[in-house]
Image: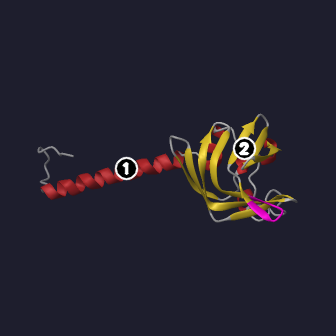
Amino acid sequence: MTFSSNSHLPVAPTSRTLLGFLLLLFLSLAFADTKLSDAPTAYEVLERFNFPRGILPEGVQSYLLSEDGTFEVYLSGNCEFKVTSSYLLRYKRKITGTVKSGTLDDLNGVSVRVLFFWFGINEVVRSGDELDFYVGPLSASFPSSSFEECPRCRCGFDCATPSVSDA
């Protein structure tokens, strides 16, 4: 960045460099702050890809989404809750995968306990009003309307007390 030599205040070359750097730093921080505040939440991004927000629990702290659809979602901590009397669902602090419209693939960080065994959920596909969850070659279907609300860690969809975000 160069300054006009017609300036009435003499500025040493190193001061010009420092002033230019500080100006660029200030502008880039101001732009970054605006861009971050305008960024959609992870739940809003899910909806853009035709998924209900409730397939992620409350507590998403941040996420990264690449142009190729790969993503990373960061929760405030590990999260576990019962989905029905026979399923226990676990989300790790970091969840990764690939998202396309109606498909979550190559999932890591989400598992389900059936009887005494834990299985990783590796794919979720939206088929009309149904969500198909794949554990290897096996799958289970649930109505997408069951995932309109985000579950809470420890109590899932059946929490007796309101969450912090409800208050």
Q: Is residue 52 left or right of residue 23?
A: right
- Secondary structure under tag 2 reads loop
State whether residue 42 appears in this view.
yes
Q: Which residue does the numbered mark 2 point to in the structure image? A: 52
Q: CA distance from mark 1 to mark 2?
A: 34 Å
Q: Residues within 10 Å of mark 1 (few under 14, many from 20)?
A: few
Q: Residues within 10 Å of mark 2 (few under 14, many from 20)?
A: many
Residue range (magenta): 112-118
Q: Residue at x 76, y 56 (%)?
A: 151
Q: Residue furthest front?
A: 137
- What secondary structure is the stretch in magenta mostly built from? strand
**Is residue 113 highlighted in magenta?**
yes
Is 51 placed above or below 78 here? above
Q: Quadrant of residue 141?
A: top right
Name the quarter where the C terminus is drawn. Answer: bottom right
Q: Which residue does the numbered mark 1 point to in the structure image? A: 28
Q: Is residue 156 left or right of residue 51?
A: right
